[in-house]
């Protein structure tokens, strides 16, 4: 598709649109509502950006937002599928560690976003591990800042707090009390320390999470080799409490536009009149929705922005054409 912007002899705007099937259309008012770059399978391939640029508008660099963040060790680095810096395609195969986490949904967790080791954002809510990486409401919420930081070359990490309702001291006491209960329980008398540890973890987190938690925190168990045949296993209760409060995931990359819910960046809002959505540079040309440099958190705000700017652009264009 092509777009040419001009004027009639009388000075009214005139746009000519050429379609892929060879059709040609002219109009005196035009609204660009082509969306962003996310989910290209829906037809959003970024044409609107090209037309905006060709007609002199500034573009704020775009990046995928509300997308999965990929923790280190989640995807197989040997089989990495990527097309840009820090982009890790969803279909990149997972590692054994990724397989342990994929499909788990965590409720009511705290998550801290660290950029260069400094807290950039802190959220509370639900988090999902998917085939892409870390998603869910909280993952999405943090992804905008995380992706922008990764693209800018910063180190990014998420710190998961599985017990946000209690402080470390209280939690440590609780872990010790649970351990003592297990110790006193006659059913655990014949169990080995590692099995007892698993029972303890089962009282502190969803059962399915234990393999990944244990793999990520080898420090929760110490092996003391006493002789060639005798190894004593120590369960480190304080380490368990610390790991529950701060499970760190260094973030290697993000899933790109192929599955990002929204595109951040786009046509600069400085080049658009907020009251009408009309371009400040090309009279008769309007922009609305995701093609603009507007993006928001999850919760329907992006759809609302598209509906509101779309209605405003439509009304403004009609009024102008009707001379009202
Ligand atoms: C899977 C998914 C889930 C989402 N969930 C939410 C949510 O829960 N809440 C929320 O607020 N937002 C959500 N969003 C974001 C929201 O859908 C978008 O922000 C919103 O739809 C943007 O509207 P738009 O009209 O600007 O663009 P779009 O809805 O992308 O529409 C653009 C249209 O233009 C067409 N187009 C593009 N280029 C051309 C061309 N050259 N020729 C012809 N046609 C073209 C496209 O095919 C498309 O139909 C979600 C997005 C996705 C992908």
Image: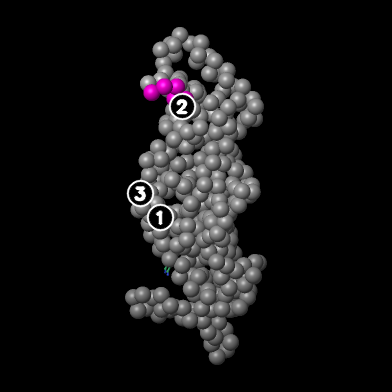
Residue lying furthest front: 227
The disc at residue 93 is: 3
**Residue corresponding to mark 2:** 223
- Choose top left, top right, bottom left or bottom right for residue 324: bottom right
**Residue corresponding to mark 1:** 89
Quote the CA–CA distance across marks 2 and 3.
33 Å
Q: Position of residue 305 (x, y in %)?
A: 57, 57
Labelled pair 1, 2 in contact (Cβ < 8 Å): no
Q: Can you say whether 215 is above or below 120 in the image?
A: above
Q: Can you say whether 135 is above or below 1 in the image?
A: above
Residue stretch rendered in magenta on the structure: 224-228
Q: Can you say whether 241 is above or below 33 in the image?
A: above
Q: Position of residue 128 (x, y in %)?
A: 47, 41
Quote the CA–CA distance across marks 3 and 1.
9 Å
Residue 308 in view? yes
Task: Determine if the magenta segment contains residue 275.
Answer: no
């Amino acid at each position: 598709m092509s777009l040419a912007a001009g004027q009639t002899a009388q000075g009214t705007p005139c746009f000519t649109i050429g379609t892929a099937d060879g059709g040609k259309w002219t109009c005196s008012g035009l609204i660009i509502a082509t969306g962003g770059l996310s989910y290209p399978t829906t037809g959003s391939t970024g044409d609107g950006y090209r037309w905006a640029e060709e007609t002199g508008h500034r573009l704020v660099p775009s990046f995928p937002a509300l997308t999965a963040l990929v923790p280190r060790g989640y995807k197989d680095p040997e089989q990495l599928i990527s097309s840009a810096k820090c982009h890790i395609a969803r279909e990149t195969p997972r590692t054994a560690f990724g397989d342990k986490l994929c499909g788990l949904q965590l409720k009511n967790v705290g998550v801290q976003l660290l950029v260069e080791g400094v807290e950039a954002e802190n959220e509370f809510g639900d988090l999902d591990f998917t085939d892409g990486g870390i998603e869910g409401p909280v993952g999405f919420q943090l992804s905008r800042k995380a992706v922008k930081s990764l693209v800018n070359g910063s180190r990014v990490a998420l710190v998961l707090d599985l017990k946000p309702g209690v402080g470390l001291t209280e939690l440590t006491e609780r872990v010790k009390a649970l351990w003592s209960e297990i110790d006193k329980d006659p059913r655990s008398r014949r169990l080995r320390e590692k099995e007892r540890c698993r029972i303890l973890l089962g009282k502190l987190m969803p059962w399915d999470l234990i393999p990944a938690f244990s793999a990520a925190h080898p420090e929760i168990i110490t092996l003391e080799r006493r002789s060639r045949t005798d190894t004593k296993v120590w369960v480190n209760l304080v380490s368990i409490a610390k790991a529950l409060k701060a499970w760190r995931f260094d973030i290697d990359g993000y899933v790109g536009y192929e599955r990002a819910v929204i595109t951040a960046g786009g046509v600069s809002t400085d080049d658009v009149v907020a009251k009408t959505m009309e371009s400040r540079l090309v009279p008769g040309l309007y922009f609305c929705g995701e093609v603009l440099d507007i993006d928001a958190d999850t919760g329907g705000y992006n759809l609302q922005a598209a509906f509101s700017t779309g209605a405003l652009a439509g009304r403004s264009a009609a009024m102008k054409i009707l001379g009202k």
